[in-house]
Image (cartoon, rainbow, N blue to C red):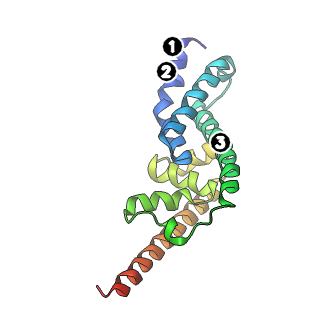
Amino acid sequence: MTKEVFQESIYTLKDEMYRFAKRFVMSADEAEDVTMELLMKLWQKKEELLSIDNLKSYVLRCVKNECLNRLKHHDVKQNFAQLEYGRSELYQIETNNLKEQILKFINDLPEKQKMVIHLKDVEEYDISEIAGILEMEENAVRINLMRARQKVREAINKLYAYENRQIQGLGV
């Protein structure tokens, strides 16, 4: 694979790789690191990429796997830190900004649901494309999407109920 072919087929996916990674790691710097590291790895095995049918799915799957590896490492460190510091529900709700809350609710979803809702609602992929990227059956993608949306909806309803109780408690 020549430099030009690599740039046309892989490097053009850089922005999409970054956005996808950012949904997992929730840090612009970490997402940038994931993207650049994967671009270097992909360049190193550029000859192997010629035999792959759907490069876009392959690249996004690589992003997913790299992010999951980093999240697992982060979870180990975070679980250790949480032994000393318990979180209260008030700490969980850091802001009243609904957009930030929704992103947090999505981030708290199980990994498959988080990936499916991101690819469908943010990246606007079709169910069949998502199934290819995540190596899942289309019905499994639909079920995970339905469950993810349901969990986010329930979390929003709980947030509204909590805020309403707080407002009523203040006599406002």
Nearest the eye: 169 or 108 = 169
Is residue 72 shown left or right of residue 7? Answer: right
Residue 1 x, y percent position in the rendering: 61, 14
What residue occupies the far left of the structure in this picture? 172
1 or 3: tag closer to the N-terminus: 1
* Viewer-nearest of discs 3 and 2: 3
Q: Residue at label 2?
A: 8
Residue 84 position (above or below residue 36) = below
Residue 76 x, y percent position in the rendering: 71, 50
Q: Residue at label 1?
A: 4
Amino acid beneath label 2: Glu
Q: Residue 70 carries which label?
A: 3
Residue 158 position (above or below residue 52) = below
Residue at x-position 55% and y-position 63%:
148
3 or 2: tag closer to the N-terminus: 2
Amino acid beneath label 1: Glu
Residue at x-position 65% and y-position 38%:
66
Residue 17 visible in the picture:
no
